[in-house]
Image (cartoon, rainbow, N blue to C red):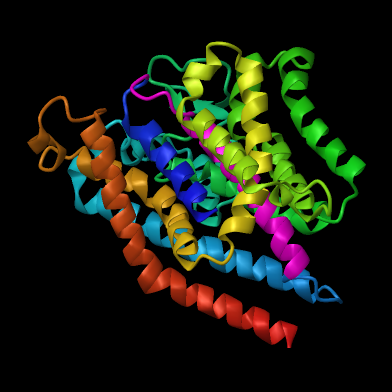
């Protein structure tokens, strides 16, 4: 499972660094959605196995421990990004680093309410997904996204230091509802997933908000719930005494996992035959593979350590991309460096190295504290 989590984080790195079409991998958005499925599985698992104390104690402990998991590293990388942007002015020159200039524009235009809303979303983690649904015109006025932005306008996410934290926002919304969702019976759970899936066509056809619905389907938390619920269903499948994929013969398990990873790595190849069919196979594959991978890897310490790198890699890789955009760093590798395989490999390597330092100096201590709180509550 840890290898799957890091693999998905590195797919996002590749999507943000490699020129389009260089690899047949799944895209960054698909990788994040698969991570939502993994997250749904883990939340159902720990709510059942660890946070089931009576009297609401387990729920309160679940929320506080999730906050300890998410916010310290999010705040650390956000502070790093802000400090680097002001200490190294050249960082504002690349395509990933326009946020100080755009934020300054909003300030000059007196859009203090918009600035406060975006700052609150970025710091709290809640609402970064919703910022993607807006765009600003040349005078700094905010509007629902209605199509490609022209002239002096810009997208609502561009003034944010960490716009890719939209997925963290979706995770946080799911965490709030996870204790309830994990207890729902199968028909109700499927009903919530279907309702989430229907929001997009309702916006597109019923309300006539085609452009907005396209963006919302990619970023808005309510439209991502189906993926988390798919992870909850994968956990219930894992527990099933007869139908769990973890009970299948070893060769069949290996075939399921290999087939799923093959779809991820050669997604664009399969996609040429059938877009819908490939998506169905992909989500079926992850639902069947997660129980197998968990059963096989749950007791492997090295796999857990690999998985621990996935969250900080996802957080820090955009800052690393901006560092490589500096002429003093990336410029040394030549004009064709950006968008190349060496560029992706360099960003991935530096992101993993930074994440290893973060995990071993900060995250492991926080995790030890989280586990001690859990043990005290259980006692």
- In magenta segment, residue 34: yes
Can I make out residue 227 in this image? yes
124 to 288, vertically: above or below: below
Q: Who is closer to the viewer here, 172 or 237? A: 237
Name the main secondary structure of what is drawn in magenta: helix
Can I make out residue 127 in this image? no
Q: Who is closer to the viewer here, 282 or 33? A: 282
User: Which portion, as a residue range, is magenta?
Assistant: 21-49
Q: Who is closer to the viewer here, 252 or 19? A: 252
Residue at the location (59% across, 62% down)? 298
Which of the image's four quarters has the C terminus?
bottom right
Where residue 244 appears, as percent x and y from the top left, is 76, 49
- In magenta segment, residue 75: no
Q: Say whether residue 291 is left or right of residue 205.
A: left
Query: Based on the displayed image, in which of its 4 quarters is residue 342 positioned?
Result: top left
Q: Who is closer to the viewer here, 54 or 122? A: 54
Residue at the location (78% across, 76% down)? 57
Where residue 242 appears, as percent x and y from the top left, is 83, 49
Where residue 88 appears, as percent x and y from the top left, is 19, 49
Q: Say whether residue 44 is left or right of residue 367.
A: right
Query: Could you tell me how many numbered marks the image carries?
Result: 0
Residue at the location (50% across, 24% down)? 267
Q: Say whether residue 54 is left or right of residue 160.
A: right
311 to 261, vertically: above or below: below
């Amino acid at each position: 499972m840890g290898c799957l989590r890091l693999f998905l984080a590195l797919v996002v790195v590749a999507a943000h660094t490699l020129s389009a079409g260089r690899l047949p991998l799944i895209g960054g958005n698909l990788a994040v959605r698969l991570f939502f499925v993994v997250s749904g599985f883990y939340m159902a698992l720990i709510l059942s196995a660890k946070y089931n104390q009576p009297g609401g104690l387990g729920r309160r402990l679940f929320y506080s421990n999730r906050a300890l998991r998410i916010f310290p590293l999010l705040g650390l990388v956000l502070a790093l990004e802000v400090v680097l942007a002001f200490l190294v002015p050249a960082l504002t020159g690349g395509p990933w680093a326009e946020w100080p200039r755009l934020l300054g524009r909003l300030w000059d235009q007196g859009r203090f309410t918009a600035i406060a809303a975006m700052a609150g979303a970025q710091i709290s983690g809640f609402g970064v997904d919703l910022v993607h649904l807006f765009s600003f015109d040349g005078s700094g006025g905010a509007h629902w996204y209605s199509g490609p932005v022209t002239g002096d306008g810009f997208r609502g996410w561009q003034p944010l230091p960490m716009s890719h934290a939209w997925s963290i926002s979706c995770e946080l919304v799911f965490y709030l509802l996870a204790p309830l969702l994990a207890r729902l019976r199968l028909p109700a759970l499927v009903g919530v997933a279907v309702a989430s899936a229907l929001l997009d066509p309702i916006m597109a056809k019923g309300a006539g908000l085609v452009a907005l619905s396209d963006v919302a389907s990619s970023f808005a938390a309510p439209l991502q719930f189906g993926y988390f619920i798919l992870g909850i269903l994968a956990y219930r499948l894992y527990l099933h005494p007869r139908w769990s994929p973890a009970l299948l013969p070893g060769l069949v398990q290996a075939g399921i996992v290999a087939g799923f990873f093959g779809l991820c790595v050669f997604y664009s190849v399969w996609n040429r035959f059938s877009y819908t069919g490939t998506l169905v196979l992909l989500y079926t594959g992850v639902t069947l593979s997660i129980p197998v991978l968990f059963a096989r890897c749950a007791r492997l310490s090295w796999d857990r350590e690999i998985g621990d790198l996935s969250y900080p890699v996802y957080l820090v890789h955009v800052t690393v991309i901006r560092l490589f955009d500096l002429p003093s760093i990336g410029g040394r590798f030549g004009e064709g460096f950006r968008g190349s395989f060496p560029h992706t490999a360099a960003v991935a390597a530096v992101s993993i190295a930074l994440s290893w330092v973060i995990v071993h100096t900060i995250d492991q201590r926080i995790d030890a504290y989280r586990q001690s709180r859990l043990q005290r509550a259980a006692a």
